[in-house]
Image: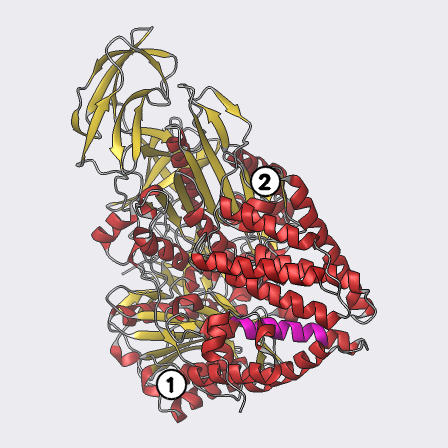
Amino acid sequence: MRKVYHKIIQIAGNVITVEAENIINGELAEVTSSRGTSLAQVIRLQGQKVFLQVFAGSRGVSTGDEVRFLGKPMQVSSSEDLLGRVFNGAGNPRDNRPSIKENMIEIGGPSVNPAKRIIPRRMIRTGIPMIDIFNSLVESQKLPIFSVAGEPYNKLLARIAMQAEVDVIILGGMGLKHDDYLFFRNTLDEQGSLSRSIMFVHTAADPVVECLLVPDMALAVAESYALNNKRVLVLLSDMTNFSDALKEIAITMEQIPSNRGYPGDLYSQLASRYEKAVDFEGAGSITILAVTTMPGDDVTHPIPDNTGYITEGQFYLRRGRIEPFGSLSRLKQLVNDKTRKDHRVIMDTMIRLYADYRETREKQSMGFKMSSWDDKLLKYGLLFEKRMMDLSVNIPLEEGLNLGWKTLAECFDKTETGVKTDIIKEFWPEKQ
Amino acid sequence: MPEKNIGKIAGINGNMLTVGFETSVTQNEVAYALLGDLRLKSEVIRVRGQFADLQVYEDTRGLKVGDSVEFTNELLSIELGPGLLAQVYDGLQNPLNKLAEKSGFFLKRGLYMEALDYEKHWAFKPAVKKGDKVCAGDKLGSVPEGIFEHLIMLPFGFKGIWEVTDISYEGNYKISQTIAKVKNELGEERTVSMVQKWPVKIPITAYKEKLIPEKPLITQQRIIDTFFPVSRGGTFCTPGPFGAGKTVLQHALSRYAEADVVVVAACGERAGEVVEILREFPHLEDPKTGRTLMERSVIICNTSSMPVAAREASVYTAITITEYYRQMGLDCLLLADSTSRWAQALREMSGRLEEIPGEEAFPAYLESLIAGFYERAGLVKLNNGKTGSVTIGGAVSPAGGNFEEPVTQATLKVVGAFLGLSRDRANARRFPAIHPLDSWSHYASIVNEEMIETAREILRRGNEVNQMMKVIGEEGTHIDDFQIYMKSEFLDAVYLQQNTFDKVDGATNEERQKYVFGKIVKFLNTKFPFNNKDEARRLFNEMRQLFIDWNYTAWNSNSFKEIESSIDSKVKERSTHA
């Protein structure tokens, strides 16, 4: 039986301090207070002093409460029985069904050896032209959706998840509104995908610290499934809440903040989660789609900024549309040369012309006379927005490419597009 | 053998240990924290009274207060010898492929392996005889390593002049075998093998003098070689916000730069990007040598999810290997992506040490460390009179894409060329997104200054006209101004932009650059009589089309010549017309 400590010498924020001996860095403890029992994790050792972050929060914890160390780090079950289940941020069932204690694995495990990774090569088709044509999603990619509060990012996330061909979907919800949690659950249910889904949901009403564990648990489970030849899609929403929880703990621990109060290791913290996305040689894969809401729609804010440097591109969701500028899939080059010969050409040309259209729009709004070229661009821009950018459009890639050529031919002459001559010869639709 | 110097852990904060010790410790010495059978490598970074602060190169989970720490009294060092080329190492020079064989998919902590193959035999050929006098860095012999003659040198740490008292015959040896014995004036005798150790944070200075870098390092990227050149032995940085194409540019450089040896340090960046190099380089042919690109490359890979402290070590490991090959008279290029991650690792440690923070919480010594790192570049005259060079190219990832931040500013102070990547250019899909007006270089270009000035003037004025047009509109712009604007756009589209994913357009050799640029400048200097703007736009669109097609044809091929003649005739027809 392990020793029980009764003397809590400091309570600050959600971190409590006790004096104890032989404590392992990172181990768990149980804190029993009048409010009930909560898990806590050792986050710093200083001589006899042990600092613990209490998952349920320190509210109601008294200095005389019991702390019992468990001698093991945070673990999560990786059993097959997880499918179809919902858990909270502490790993306990949220669906009134029994908890699962089989095949326990540590969370936050080591990094994958880069030498064992393989170059991603499978495209994930979503039926959304702004993704499939312009920024193809690739299996094992990690990609955030940069958005602001009020945008339908969770809907987009759910839609991609439903259309993507994967074996297992794992949702990690952080600070999720209860409605959103129900939305995800109902969507998965309606599409008959609940039985291949696992949910770790921390809602906005739950204690902040539990939010920190969600991505680690979701990804640890994903990793064990991927090693068993499963293609796993992990959805994380919303990583901004996760980062804010990190900030809260860092400030409590009196760490020197680096940028707008966020800890100096924000980059490393985010990276160690996102880098779990992987395509294992000879086994399955993990693809991560995350939502990052940008405070004040500011992409230079530390959270989206650090995220952008880690992830393999990003989708900007603004006014209900995926923005063509700034949105980027870094891995698209790996797959979009194998789809159709004109894929890249359409991608580059249409975006370039759309950029020109935006400039023309600016000129137009300032009241300048439109040249004949401007008129062409104006026509093109509207068509592009209607046929490509609208999120309600749901067509396969090839159809999208044809539509692209059609749009170009409706608006421009051959030489105006800047496309290589041989491609023009092959794909330019002749006028009917 | 003195008794082991053992300390006891007194505190654990993230990857920092506070360790109480009894005798003495050395700043920056390596120590091992003992966790059961595991030995976790760490480095002393501060000493206060009877306590030393150590940064651990591993996850510290599982350690306890009171656990033992073993000090080694050795600075963090790496092994230098034949067999470094084509290797993939982590930041501490552990071979990742061998680690994978041993521990599978994941990087097991506390598992360290020899960097070089100690079983392999190398064909050694002596170059000195008994009685010869040598000093540090002098050639004792050589072994063939791929396409290079790998010099076996008197270890760089040997001070003064040494007399060769024994040297092995020509033959096959393992790297640990003694190949020479030497004696100095004091009578001290030492043995020399083919492998030597060198502390990574100390520059190798076994050369005669540092020279001014003058010869260009051809990168085959038009905007760099022509407009913002880099010299052999020079330094450059590529700061840019995410998505501006830093890594794609670095990859292009690692492929096409005409250096003998390329060391790629993937420092705190995405693992996926390294994988592309790891998997592709062994299959890509180096057009210069006909061998694979891997055979001239060393990859140091400490990606963002690997331990933070080793990230700091990785850039030093990389530069030390680069310097080592320079000592053989080779032109070496180090590409570090990204130095900002290294700076962030310093910041994390500084925070744990509770040092008084500088700007954006970076430590106050950031600038001097960055300067010290870039100063390890240079063109040097070796002891034998030959030259060797280390060129450093560092990617910088400024927070928020803002170049005013400390890492970018500290870097700009010490580099010879600044290739600033711009988000606007990237958004407009103009790659490489190096900004043609903001960037600069102190080095000499491959084409003459006058031509560049012409081109630059067009770009500058084109930009002005563009700004003006935004205010007064196209119809208010004079046709001559409009022509300049069209010319600047043309130059941008057909010369500054380059499709790195195309086999031909991705790499433009020196000769072709000179030739094409000459043609373009001639075109830019030609004034066309236009009646209206649509007419101008039409011509420039046609010309752009022709030149882009031209860029995609192989140098001096038939189609190259065909397109050239249609360009010539079109220019002739239009410039005399009307």
Q: Is residue A324 left or right of residue B114?
A: right
Q: Which residue is mark 2?
A: B445
Residue B470 placement (x, y as % from top left): 77, 67
Q: Quadrant of the C terminus of chain B?
A: bottom right
Residue B412 placement (x, y as % from top left): 62, 42
Which contiguous range is marked in magenta?
A348-360
Residue B347 position (above or below residue B320): below
Badge 1 sits on which subunit? A
Q: How many marks?
A: 2
Return the residue nearer the eye: A193 or B513. Answer: B513
Badge 2 sits on which subunit? B
Residue B341 placement (x, y as % from top left): 50, 50
Name the residue rendered at 48%, 55% in the picture: B247
Element under label 1? loop
Residue B148 is inside the magenta segment = no
Residue B161 position (above or below residue B16): above
Disc 1 residue type?
Answer: Asp
Secondary structure predominantly adopted by residues drawn in magenta = helix
Disc 2 residue type?
Answer: Ser
Q: Which mark is residue B460?
A: none
Residue B505 visible in image: no
Name the residue rendered at 29%, 58% in the picture: A116
Q: Which residue is mark 1?
A: A95
Disc 1 residue crowd, few under 14, some 14–19, many 20+, Cα 10 Å: few
Q: Quadrant of residue B423?
A: bottom right
Residue A283 position (above or below residue B53): below
Q: Quadrant of residue B570?
A: bottom right
Disc 2 residue crowd, few under 14, some 14–19, many 20+, Cα 10 Å: many
Question: Residues at badges 2 and 1 in contact (C-beta under 8 Å)?
Answer: no
Residue B141 position (above or below residue A83): above
Q: Is residue A391 left or right of residue A216?
A: right
